[in-house]
């Protein structure tokens, strides 16, 4: 157990729907990062939060949004889902910005 | 300029052999280079990392070699074991810069160690 908890582990949903992925960082970690992993694109950075504030954005689609709450857990919201959104979504956390960080086990999203 | 290129895509090694995975980067602002190991169904796990002020770092059977002038770094796995079979990712970031720790990953190398 890495200490980073992601729920749910698996999610199957239909095109056009909206889902929310949840991440609880390791105790004491203030930074949360979201990554998308697909076979053809590898690990792609989506967005980072530090102590509740958005710090960096990658190639995150406008249909996707995220937030970090006062208790430091984070949620990634994916809406108007398309088949191409099927992927593994990982959350990672670190004590501060930068350096190595710890990944959760991911949420496997399948859009049908 | 943000790319990290990793090779080979896949690697087959006999037990006891040396596994070598190479990465090259373009962004000279990168100052932290971690390697991650990922098993099927799991998230990537930090294996070993290096900063550009040293040319080599060793932890057990795992060694990172770093060539700043060539903008290349590599992972060597000595005495490779079947349990090392996994996907390995190199990554890079500017830990103290405006990228705020965003990691740029290589495409990954699938390592298979035959018994």
Image (spheres, coloured by chain):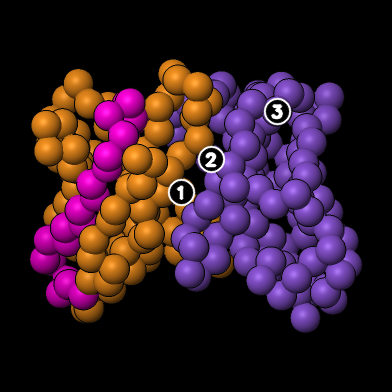
Chain colours: A purple, B orange
Q: CA distance from mark 1 to mark 2?
A: 7 Å
Q: Which residues are magenta?
A: B12-33
Which quarter of the picture shows residue B2?
A: top left
Left or right: B112 in relation to A110: left
User: Which residue in the structure is indicated by mark 2?
Assistant: A102
Q: CA distance from mark 3 to mark 2?
A: 19 Å
Give the image location of residue A52, x and y in percent.
Answer: 76, 24
Specify the quadrant that holds the C terminus of chain B.
bottom left
Closest to the observer: B25 or B45? B25
- A17 within the magenta span: no
- Rendered view: A83 above or below B103: below
- Rendered view: A43 above or below B51: below
Left or right: B6 in relation to A38: left
Q: What residue is drawn where x is 58% and y is 42%?
A: A58
| Disc nearest the viewer among 3 and 1 | 3
Instruction: Evaluate whether residue A103 shows in this view.
Output: no
User: Which residue in the structure is indicated by mark 1?
Assistant: B45
Within 10 Å of disc 1 (Cα), the crowding (few <14, some 14-19, many 20+) is many
Specify the quadrant that holds the N terminus of chain B.
top left
């Amino acid at each position: 157990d890495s200490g980073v908890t992601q729920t749910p582990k698996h999610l199957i949903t239909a095109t056009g729907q909206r889902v929310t992925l949840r991440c609880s960082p390791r105790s004491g970690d203030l930074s949360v990062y979201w990554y998308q992993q697909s076979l053809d694109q590898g690990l792609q950075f989506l967005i980072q939060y530090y102590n509740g504030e958005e710090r960096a954005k990658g190639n995150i689609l406008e249909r996707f949004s995220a937030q970090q709450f006062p208790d430091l857990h984070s949620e990634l919201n994916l809406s108007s889902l398309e088949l191409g959104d099927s992927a593994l979504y990982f959350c990672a956390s670190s004590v501060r910005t930068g350096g190595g960080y710890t990944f959760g086990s991911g949420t496997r999203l399948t859009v049908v | 300029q943000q790319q990290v290129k990793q090779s080979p895509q896949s690697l087959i090694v006999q037990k006891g052999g040396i596994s070598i995975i190479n990465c090259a980067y373009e962004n000279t602002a990168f100052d932290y280079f971690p390697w991650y190991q990922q098993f099927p169904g799991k998230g990537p796990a930090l294996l070993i990392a290096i900063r550009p002020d040293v040319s080599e770092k060793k932890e057990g059977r795992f060694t990172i070699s770093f060539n700043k002038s060539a903008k290349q770094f590599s992972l060597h796995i000595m005495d490779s074991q079947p349990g090392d079979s996994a996907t390995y990712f190199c990554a890079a970031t500017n830990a103290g810069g405006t990228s705020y720790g965003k990691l740029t990953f290589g495409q990954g190398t699938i390592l298979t160690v035959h018994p």
